[in-house]
Image (tube, rainbow, N blue to C red):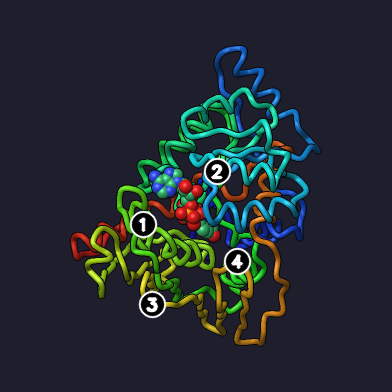
Amino acid sequence: MSPKHSRSGAPITRRGFAKSAVTAIGLGPVLSGSKVPSAPGAKSEQERSNRRFDRSGASLGIALVGLGNYSANQLAPALQETQHVHLAGIVTGTPEKAVTWQERYPQVQGHVYDYENFDQIADDDAIDIVYVVLPNSMHAEFTIRAARAGKHVICEKPMAVSADEAREMITACESAGVHLSIGYRLHYEPHNVEAMRIGQEGVFGDPKYVQTSFGFRLGNPNQWRLRKSLAGGGALMDVGIYAVQAARYVTGEEPIRVTAQEVKTDPLKFAEVDETVTWQMTFPSGCIATCATSYAARMERLFFAGTSGWVEVRPAYIYGGIGGRTSSGPMDLPAVNQQARHMDAVGESIAAGTRLRIDGYEGLRDMVVLDAIYESIRTGGAVDLA
Ligand code: NAD
């Protein structure tokens, strides 16, 4: 069996990793673990902390920060289906959005903030969790401000624009005694969870080869995703991160070596960020992953093979319509609301005071790999991570 990690960094077995994945889609008991330590400090902080953790059984209030496409079309609708969390507030820089959201979701009235007065959220008892859904380079600032306000945080992927930033976010949340989760919804999607189980349990023998890609054609040339100052990077940061995640979660291992190459077919449009990137990751067991991401080519597939069989999930990473098969036959698994499952799992875990299945360290591990991919593109050589 190959070397493994847990999300806290402690080693676990491949089987243990898969068990927690099964737990994540509601097929097992709540993952038990140590309580997040309360922050030392002033009495008011302690009082806030008590209030935060005295919520067992209650549905926790979420404030969405940034009311763009993902908040409006995925997260807010998903929050109509959740049991352990509910939409309780909004943070927006656009007054018109504040009006329309309050009309659509009257429960947020009285819990509306903008980016300047955001810190006042500290005194809002209706908000337990701040969900950061802003352009990537704003994730660190709002995660840190939310932690300082004494709120738990869910931050969208990519967690940050560098591993150093991700570490600062983890430190801020740990110092404040709040939980931090990353929006990795696929840990609650049955095909991906089954792929994790098959890979990590070695159902077809240990994975020897992974091939995965995620790309789409990016339209509007004026969007923040093309500005390095807001996006941090291009296709790799936006959707290539899913391929990094998948290679890690089907092997249950951390890459020890990365090589990468970049191609631009439209250097004008992609003057600031990467358009198409291919990369290779070597894992301690000897498994090799070959991956691709693009803002030009449409692709979405997760394939891996062990000594006695293979798994293909295609499409693998979208919100719905995911399908798959293995060398033994089709995967007959249900479609679920991934966002609702993820947010519910976070709420349930926080209420129970247990360690989150997807925490900041999980986001950090991907950021370390993304940094290495960019470094390999820059230097033209291999980057060792071991
Ligand atoms: P979007 O452009 O639709 O929304 C961005 C929001 O940020 C808008 O409300 C915008 O007004 C606000 N904003 C604040 N300051 C801004 C600035 N300086 N420039 C531009 N916008 C600014 O983007 P989105 O698709 O909702 O993505 C938001 C985040 O969610 C990103 O980090 C993205 O990676 C992530 N996301 C995750 C998933 C997923 O499946 N987990 C899917 C889509 C997006």
Amino acid at dot 3: Ala
Residue 370's disc number: 1
How far apart are the alpha carbons under marks 1 and 2?
36 Å
Q: Amino acid at mark 4?
A: Tyr
In the picture, which quadrant includes the C terminus? bottom left
Q: What is the CA distance from the residue labelled 1 to the residue labelled 4? A: 23 Å
Q: Earlier in the sequence, mark 4 or mark 2?
A: 2
In this figure, which residue is indicated by the disc labeled 3?
Answer: 297
Amino acid type of the residue that numbered disc 2 sits on in the rendered structure: Glu
User: Which is nearer the N-term, disc 1 or disc 3?
Assistant: 3
- Residue at the image position 66 percent from the left and 49 percent from the top: 343
* Callout 2: SS: helix
Which residue occupies 47% across, 37% down?
142
Q: Circle 2 is placed at which residue position?
A: 96
Which of label 4 and label 2 is nearer to you? 2
Mark 4 surroundings: few (<14), some (14-19) or many (≥20) residues within 10 A = some
Query: Mark 4 vs ligand 1: CB under 8 Å?
Result: yes
Q: Which of pointers 1 and 2 lies earlier in the amino acid sequence?
A: 2
